[in-house]
Image (cartoon, rainbow, N blue to C red):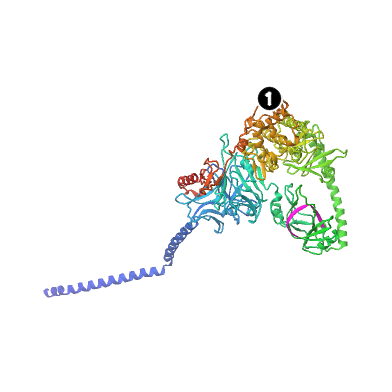
Amino acid sequence: MKLMSRRTSISSPSSSFMSATFLVLFLLLITAVLVTRVESKVQINPSFELAVSKKEAAAAELRRSNTRLEEKGRVIIKGNSTIISQNQTFRLGFFATNGESSWYLGIWYASIPTPTYVWVANREKSVADVTQSTLLITEKGKLAIKDSQNSIIWQSTNTEKATDMYLLETGNLVLLSSAGSLVWQSFDHPTDTWLPGMNISVGGSITSWKSLFDPSPGFYSLRLSPTGYNQIELVYNGTIVYWSTGNWTGNAFVNVPEMTIPYIYKFHFLNPYTSKASFGYTEKPLDNGQKPPLSRFHVDPSGQLKQYTWSQQTDYWNMFWSQPEDICRVHGLCGNFGFCKSSLLRPCMCFDGFRPVDCYGWNSGDYSGGCSRESKVLCDQSDWFEEVGVVEFIGAVTESFSAGRSICERSCLANCSCIGLYHDVRTNLCKNLYGELLNLRNLTSDSTNEDILYVRAPRGGTERKNISTLMVLVAGIVGSIAALVLAAVMLMILRKKRKKRKDVDEEDVFPVLNLKVFSYKELHTVTRGFSEKLGHGGFGAVFQGELSDSTLVAVKRLERPGSGEREFRAEVCTIGNIQHVNLVRLRGFCSENSHRLLVYDYMPNGALSLYLRKDGLNLNWDVRFRIAVGTARGIAYLHEECRDCIIHCDIKPENILLDSDYTAKVSDFGLAKLIGRDFSRVLATMRGTWGYVAPEWISGLAITTKADVYSYGMTLLELIGGRRNVEAPASGRNANIGGGGEHGDKWFFPPWAARQIIEGNVAAVVDDRLGGAYKVEEAERVALVAIWCIQDNEEMRPTMGTVVKMLEGVLEVTAPPPPRLIQALVSGESYHGVRKDSSNGVGTGGDGSGDIGESRGGSHSSFGNVSSPMNENANVSIEKFAEETEKDNSSSSQ
């Protein structure tokens, strides 16, 4: 047993060792198997690998997306969202002018119902899909427009990085840096509108739209002269100057004497006559402390510079001033072979046998394409010569030789390059024309040129077709029969309808018919085809006519009827029932389709304006006094004795007519309402001066009867002096008058006349042609009444009824105070600009007031709030920027 035990004890260690070894080997084997299985699972499980790769790809895409967002920058406007200035004066957003295929980013007035755009960013390239278009500040700090393809259409030109954008109350769009400094502003990059606070500097320009519906750059620009730096000029195609303000005199430009009236604007000219010159204007509060009206200067697609003021009374832009006064003086307006006639609403027209090259542009107000022959054949031996008249033009080269008219025509027809001819019967001189006919318009009445132009045109005005005579004959007969039958049926139907409508209208509108209803055909015959034109006013042209009983009449053809036929008849009925010895009597009218014509008594002695020229017809004092009193009575009747008060709105010598006994009769009363209250058209006829316009017109205040009183007072001054209020400098004793009335080739008469009258020197104002043959007491009375009528404050002006009593001697006429506007002119208190000091070259205020400085991008206005939900993070402190710009302004206002 012991042996056995020993054995057992001896063998136990061995087996333990073996067991341990086996256990280790077993564990290693298990571990290897497990590892192998795990590795096998990882290698054969593609879904796990895919999940990992998707997660990594998503993270990579997120990183790339963040990068693109950083590149895109911060979106300011998207689609149809807009931004409005702080006081809701201006709005920034995308707009379309004609349909929805072309969209532009622009600024327009938000506070008025009439869409009026003052600035366009991408005027050279529009966007098609506005819903996917954006305005943003890029990562590089530029303001940019991106289209639906994420392409940059337009971007600002700033070199310093911008972080914020603001639309100011001035209409200026500004970009600010992180430090709050200005890095870019829209006022430095204007389009077609010149706003208060905006400066025109050397190298900059304000360029018109291509047409009324196309904001792309047009042909006409307003710029500071790049040579003398001393005047503002209108330029065609960047090269040809066709109008300028004349030299700067220190407080005004030579050819713009209206600037000396210090009512709304402050003009300032920094560093004139130097390459750093900059000209601009600002508005100042009205005398009653109210804000000035909205105002702007606009370079029209027609090439005229126009000044507008918004009237809250009429919800309309009143135009008070435009240059050139004659639209036909705009270079290249009607293009090649286009004839300009300023009396027409559409001033350009094509001759018979010609048609517009660009019909769409022509209908949109862009006439620059001119006219071309209707026939595709450039020339033909069967061409004829259309008489144009005594005209002027440029562009054509002439070839002169002596020959009769027939040889002259044959010579031109033999050369396809010949476009027309002149022929002088007296001298037998022929001039054939080659090249282009630009700026083609009628000569002025004082021209001595008597050459008549004949333009070569295709005969009949249409292209000849290669159609056989038989086919033409058959087609003509069949077509004529069908047309006659159809016309007969339609005529019967129309006559019945028209008779019913006419009976109803005349029964309703004319309970007491005092007027004759003319047909257009009748008046066409009466006026011999509107061939004898008497004149042209703010509402249309006037033609002489003769009725069947040999009675002479004046037929006025309204150019812009503003109402339907029923409304027109009702207004005409009102005018026709107004009867007064000093009002022109309305005899009848025509309201047929789009034709609106009025028939008045004919006034054989014409308008008062004919007698207000030193070289014209003269009126003795008795006639002048009767005209003054009669005109006042007529206006007083309109104001005070009609059932409804009628404000004339256009009192001036052209609308005071004289009958056979030289009795004054006021014309055109009631027409302002008749044509739809288009007051801007009325004012545009006032010879381009504020001379007849009451101050409240300019300020945008409500218009009352006192506006007519002011115009009547200005007319009285012309009647006393026998001259126009604005004309070339007078010779003799009035040539060197003082007081700021003289401005080169234009002279404003009222300032000097008012001073003389107030000082008691009425004799100096009275017309020299009277030779002292006038009643001194009456002359003094008329002169004092005139000054009372032109007081700045309308409450100080008398009513027209009071004016009549003052003129008749019933009421005593006391000495009036000098009108502030007039007094400012004669005492040199008008707002002087900034002139160059010869001693140190520093710009100094002409009046030493120190309140006229350079206007820099909204420095006098509060900043607008960016209200777009896309720009919630646009919070930046701008007090520093405002403070710095105010400091800059104060330093520049010396």
Q: Residues within 10 Å of mark 1 (few under 14, many from 20)?
A: few
* Residue 378 shown left or right of residue 322 in the figure: right
Question: Is 445 contained in the magenta span?
Answer: no
The quadrant the N terminus occupies is bottom left
Residue 93 drawn above or below residue 32: above
The foreground one among 698 and 152 is 698
Give x and y (percent) for residue 464.
Answer: 82, 61
| In the rendered image, the vertical position of residue 668 relative to residue 242, given as above or below | above
Count of number-bearing discs: 1
Spot the residue most to the left: 2
On screen, residue 726 versus residue 148, left or right, reads right
Single out the residue that lies furthest toward the front. Answer: 732
Q: Residue 771 at what x, y percent from top left?
A: 75, 34
Q: Tell me, yes or no, if residue 5 can be seen here.
A: yes
The secondary element bearing badge 1 is classed as: loop
The residue under label 1 is 812
Q: Main secondary structure of the magenta part?
A: strand
Residue 60 as seen in the image, left or right of residue 128? left
Q: Is residue 317 visible?
A: no
- Give the residues drawn in magenta, as a range: 385-397
Which of the 4 quarters of the picture holds residue 32? Answer: bottom left
Residue type, numbered disc 1? Glu
Q: Nearer the viewer, residue 267 or 824?
A: 824
* Residue 386 painted magenta: yes
